[in-house]
Image: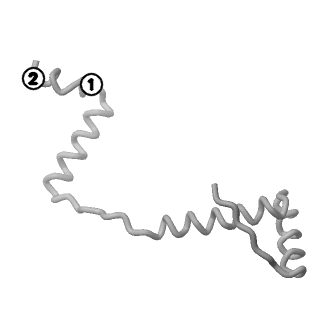
Amino acid sequence: MTKVEFSITNREAELLTVRAAQLGYSLTTYIKLLASQEASKTIGAQSVPVFRLSSKAEARALKAAREHRAGNTVCFDSFVDLTA
């Protein structure tokens, strides 16, 4: 965990304390919440590569998912079980 120290004006502290109290938090907890939300936005904004399936591959994947939900699949403990 990283410790961060910063200064805010008395007015900023007052406004943040009022908002924190409205939400049932202490000033420190509220500031941690704000920092956490901002970090989550930053992480969420990073692009994750997405690869589109061909129509044929998508149809096979959807069929496999339906079969799995219907209980028509078998669980193997290892690759060796596939060749047995």
Look at 13% across and 54% down and name the residue there: 56
Whether residue 65 sits left or right of residue 59 in the image: it is right
Q: State the residue in front, 17 or 8.
A: 8
Disc 2 versus disc 1: nearer the observer? 2
Question: Against 36, is 6 above or below?
Answer: below
Quarter of the image for the N terminus: give it. Answer: bottom right
Q: Amino acid at mark 1?
A: Cys
Quarter of the image for the C terminus: give it. Answer: top left
Please name the residue that numbered disc 2 is placed on.
83
Residue at the extreme left: 83
Look at 19% across and 50% down and name the residue there: 59
Look at 72% across and 62% down and name the residue there: 32
Q: Amino acid at mark 2?
A: Thr
Query: Mark 2 falls on what kind of element?
Result: helix
Rendered image: mark on residue 75: 1
Whether residue 47 sits left or right of residue 9 in the image: it is left
Badge 2 crowding class, 10 Å Cα cut-off, few under 14, some 14 to 19, many 20 or more, is: few
Badge 1 crowding class, 10 Å Cα cut-off, few under 14, some 14 to 19, many 20 or more, is: few
In primary-sequence order, the first of circles 2 and 1 is: 1
Whether residue 65 sits left or right of residue 9 in the image: it is left
